[in-house]
Amino acid sequence: VVEGLRFVRDAAGVRVAGAAQGASVVWARPRHDASGAAASDAGFGPPSLVADSDRESVSGGVAHGDEVLLFGRRDVGGSEYAQTWLQRGGTTAVSGPDTFSTTGLYRFSDIHGAAWAGDRWVVVGERSGNGDVRASALVATSADGVHWQAGRHQRVFRRGDGYGKSDALTDLDGLAGTSRTMLSVAGLGAGLVAVGSVTERGLYRPAAWLSSDKATWRLVPLPLGRASEAGAHEVAVLGTTIVAAGRAMIGRNLRTHAWTSTDAGKTWREAPLGPDDSPDRVKLVVARGRIVALVGTEPGRGLMLLTSADGSSWHPVDAPALAVPTGAPWRMSAADLTPAGDGVDVLVRTSSASDGRSTVVHVPLR
């Protein structure tokens, strides 16, 4: 059984992290052959073991040079804690259960995204000391992938809820009924941008966070437009253009949506992205000087790639390998997307009533 596959984004090769037979593993293949051409047809080697316990799971990662930072979670006494694995030179450094967690009886933490930010690693996610009642944003940076520094908030909005009168609602910290969750992060000039969601009176709202020094963060609400609820879960940056992508509830329809800033996060505008009936989460990367979005089409019938140079106008990419022929007895869903050589690699999952498999499909960008 193979499941939970994600790309580990890396300039030197293609790695896929996931679970196989209950263990957390990474598969690798060279991205380029000896002539420098894309080796998109090369096979993956045997999986390398990351963790052999069913209490640990890898959900993603990012690479820089000869270092690989994997992230996931570990079950300790029935509670789940965020965990990282820093692989370097044949050795692996594993973070402890208190690295990303707050104190509390019902504490948990989870990492949803990571990036190399030029001079340090950064991870984002959510954490709480009181279950899902007080979910707060998790953000931390590390120069060596071993010692981590928690991010700081810029503002305090108010204090006190039913669980404590002195606790603060900040850019990063939630209180009862007002959560903060970061889902994706990217470098923005000398700083960082993250996206995710906040809750207000039980409703989800899209949000971004900006940091000019990679340490202190300011919450920026994103426009709802006609949506009653929405959340952003992917971000990509091209110069001063930021594109955040997620889902929005418009009327009774849940559809893919995008939020774009062309001035490094000072102002934002929102617009639908992709087909009206797309059931899949959007994936975003920057490849060949463009922002690339992977979205679903009619449920289970294929995937669509869109590119944009400005974050506003989107153009479809001819990709027959991502279409499901009419009448075919199988379905296709998106797993992940990564830059690769002259285009992008798409990690897709195809399934039928009796079988399922994951495949990496290379799509050139002209």
Image (cartoon, grey):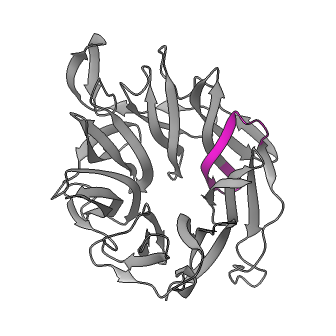
Q: Residue at x 31, y 70 (%)?
A: 273
Q: Going by the image, does 66 lie left or right of 97? A: right
Q: Going by the image, does 79 lie left or right of 166? A: right
* Residue 56 lies in the magenta stretch: yes
Q: Residue 160, relative to residue 128: is it above or below?
A: above
Q: Residue 111, relative to residue 323: is it above or below?
A: above
User: What is the quadrant of residue 153 in the picture?
Assistant: top left
Q: Which residues are magenta?
A: 51-68
Q: Residue at x 30, y 74 (%)?
A: 310
* Residue 165 lies in the magenta stretch: no
Q: Residue 189, relative to residue 262: is it above or below?
A: above
8 or 217: nearer the viewer: 8
Work out which residue is located at the far left of the displayed protein and give it: 226
Residue 4, image x and y in percent?
62, 52
Q: Residue at x 38, y 57 (%)?
A: 189
Residue 105 appears in the figure:
yes
Residue 5, image x and y in percent?
64, 56
Overall secondary structure of the magenta section: strand
Residue 18, image x and y in percent?
68, 52
27 or 38: nearer the viewer: 27
